[in-house]
Amino acid sequence: MGENTSAENQLPHQVFSVSIDTNPRSGSEWFDDDGRPKRTGTVWTASAHIITAVIGSGVLSLAWAIGQLGWIAGPAVMLLFSLVTYYTSTLLSACYRSGDPITGKRNYTYMDVVRANLGDVKVKICGFVLYLNPFGVATGYTIASSISMMAIKRSNCFHKSGGKNPCRMNANPYMIGFGITEILLSQIPGFDQLHWLSLVAAVMSFTYASIGLGLGIGKVIENGKISGSLTGISIGTVTQTQKIWISFQALGNIAFAYSFSMILVEIQDTIKSPPSEAKTMKKATLISVVVTTLFYMFCGCFGYAAFGDLSPGNLLTGFGFYNPYWLLDIANAAIVIHLVGAYQVSCQPLYAFIEKEAAQRFPDSEFITKDINIPIPGFRPYNLNLFRMIWRTLFVVLTTVISMLLPFFNDIVGLLGALGFWPLTVYFPVEMYIVQKKIPKWSTRWLCLQILSVACLIITIAAAAGSVAGIVGDLKSIKPFQTSY
């Protein structure tokens, strides 16, 4: 007792200082109000993350999607999806903090937000949809990257042979190569260390989207006319039944192009404050949706104007071997680099969820919780976690195998868009916002939000049906693990 009194008398200043430094709400320059290291994200880094996730392989299928719907419905549906996505994203961003938007408790993941507002039952439903989605997204990105890698190889082969060699090749080695790259990059622990990858990927997305746009404009000028029709692909080119199914599938393709709500909360958790995270996120979402919609409109519309009813499922590979072929090679290389980054950004929430759950269930397991410091000359040490390394590697291997089993780009993209759009982009944000803002049941605002949700559900069901019909049709003509182009 005497020792304690003596220590307090001798070092009152030091004891007082420690209590300030370790208090998470002390306003420390090193820590935020939740005790975590100070967040440094801005509206621009958040926009880069969103653009990286949004302008992915989805942009390549938009000319085909508009081709199925026509000049009236195609751009109108795309604009409608952009408005719905922006609006529901602002609803979701308002739920990042529970209670007070400035000082309320932070929710670090999409699942945390659902748990805080809707309870455990809906958390389980959300978790199933949310963490199934990265499997599909990773599969779609693997397929798209392999198509672009093969397009480069075939383009060079075609020009060397003077057009005499059809240059057919198997997709599997390219999917495996992409998978190996993702295994290495998947060892990056979390979002806070992905800034550089997101920025590189965002630049790449603008690169190939710009080249696709330029080639589309050039093709329209070369043709001397604008191809396409007001109602889309004509009956005769396809049957009436096929027209219905592929129109539904086109809705899924457009929905997929706007799928980013599942990572919105994680991105918002990187943003510094003040101003409030919700305010910054609304600006970042607006910037991202406006920029991506302009790109989508230009790429989709000029692609359709160039090819009409023959608009390819993947715009850049659909240009075939037009000159300058080296420009197409650059565009396809940019796609691959972008998808390498987008894969990681999209899968980080799943990685974080599995690792958090494992640590909570087995807190005494060194295999799960222990980090091994590996010194790297010239850099800070890398923390190797054996569980993280093995589980993330198994995830990448599984998605690569699925890609080789179901290498149907447009069908997979449409199905992913359909399955993820309504629950994650519309339903949960709407329901959480109603709870967060205490909107009275049957009030005008409540009714409008419910009408929006039901309308999007109908679109989702139609898009999913069209995509499943497409996959069933493709399975009849393509053998798994033996896909060649």
Image (spheres, grey):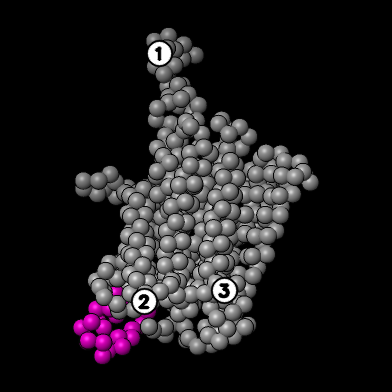
The reply to whether dot 1 and dot 3 touch (C-beta < 8 Å) is: no
| Pointer 2 residue | 223
| Pointer 3 residue | 231
- Where is residue 151? Give x, y as percent: 32, 76
- The image quadrant of residue 250 is bottom right
On the question of residue 147 being in view, the answer is: no
Task: Please give the name of the residue rendered at 47% of the width and 31% of the height, measured from the top-left corner.
Answer: 274
Q: How far is the residue under mark 1 from the one under mark 3?
A: 78 Å
Is disc 1 placed on a helix, strand or loop?
A: helix
- The image quadrant of residue 458 is bottom right
Between 257 and 235, which is closer to the camera in this rendering? 235
- Where is residue 97? Give x, y as percent: 58, 38
Amino acid type, mark 3: Thr
Q: How far is the residue under mark 3 from the one under mark 2?
A: 21 Å
Q: Which mark is residue 450?
A: none
Decide: is 283 above or below 273.
below
Between 341 and 85, which is closer to the camera in this rendering? 85
Mark 3 or mark 2, earlier in chain: 2
Is disc 3 placed on a helix, strand or loop?
A: loop
Judged from this view, the residue extending furthest toward the bottom is 164
Amino acid type, mark 1: His
| Pointer 1 residue | 13
Judge depth for marks 3 and 2 and give the one in front: 2
Mark 2 or mark 1, earlier in chain: 1
User: Dot 2, crowdedness within 10 Å: few (<14), some or many (≥20)?
Assistant: few
Magenta extent: 150-173
- Where is residue 343? Give x, y as percent: 42, 61
